[in-house]
Amino acid sequence: MKKTGLYFGSSTGHVEGIADKVAQLLGIDAADVHNVANATPESAMEYDLLILGSSTWGYGDLQDDWEGFLPKLAKQDLSGKQFAVFGCGDSSSYSDTFCDAMAEIAEQVKAAGATLIGQIPADGYSYDATRCEEDGQLIGCCLDEDNESDETDDRLDTWVQAIKKA
Ligand SMILES: Cc1cc2nc3c(=O)[nH]c(=O)nc-3n(C[C@H](O)[C@H](O)[C@H](O)COP(=O)(O)O)c2cc1C
């Protein structure tokens, strides 16, 4: 059984709400769910699998609390760990930078030695562009609570199955 920790940053509560759902779906204890606004990067060292969630702000930028946390997390030696990413964006108003913060997190956490799991098909989305798409797949679970919240449960299910298979 992989020891799993979930780290999220959320400005208006969307990612925070999704983090609760993800914790339930993956059986993660509340004590292992961390808001990056007040988490320590060293705490990540105790986990085999990191689940990382951020919304995207500005024009393709990290959620504010991740701006401070990500560089510190990426300074840890994360080799041997697996990680998966999820996030919320707005595929209508920010159609060219949809969920880009997830890709920034993935890039830096990969560079720190961890292995990405939980890629899913990019079918059924309406964005114009995202850094999260690679070879027709999404690097993780991109969600749009502003416009497509009716898709969220199915998207989460697909992603959770991919994580469990990895
Ligand atoms: C000023 C502003 C900038 C935003 N920029 C982006 C963006 O570049 N890409 C994107 O996908 N979503 C963008 N969004 C949408 C938010 O990421 C989305 O509403 C998200 O659900 C917020 O989640 P949170 O409440 O967990 O922070 C932006 C929203 C606002 C208000």
Image (cartoon, rainbow, N blue to C red):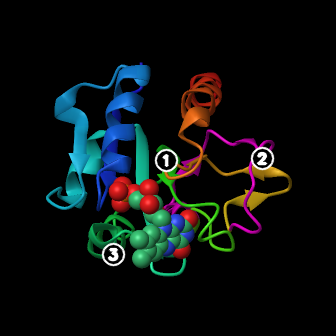
Q: Is residue 111 visible?
A: no
Vertical position of residue 149 compared to residue 75: above or below: above
Q: Is residue 111 magenta?
A: yes
Amino acid identity at mark 1:
Glu
What is the spatial separation of the Cα atoms under label 1 and label 2, in whole angstroms? 17 Å
Mark 2 element type: loop
Along the horizontal axis of the image, is 28 left or right of 155?
left
Q: Which residues are magenta?
A: 101-130
* Residue located 57% across and 33% down the image: 150
Mark 3 element type: helix
Amino acid identity at mark 2:
Ala
Residue linked to disc 1: 145
* Residue located 42% across and 50% down the image: 52
Residue linked to disc 2: 122
Residue 96: image x %, image y %? 69, 74
* Residue located 17% across and 58% down the image: 40
Q: Ligand 1: which quarter?
A: bottom left
- Of callouts 3 and 2, the N-terminal one: 3
Q: Is residue 18 visible?
A: yes
Q: Is residue 144 magenta?
A: no
Q: Is mark 1 within 8 Å of ligand 1?
A: yes
What is the spatial separation of the Cα atoms under label 1 and label 3, in whole angstroms? 22 Å
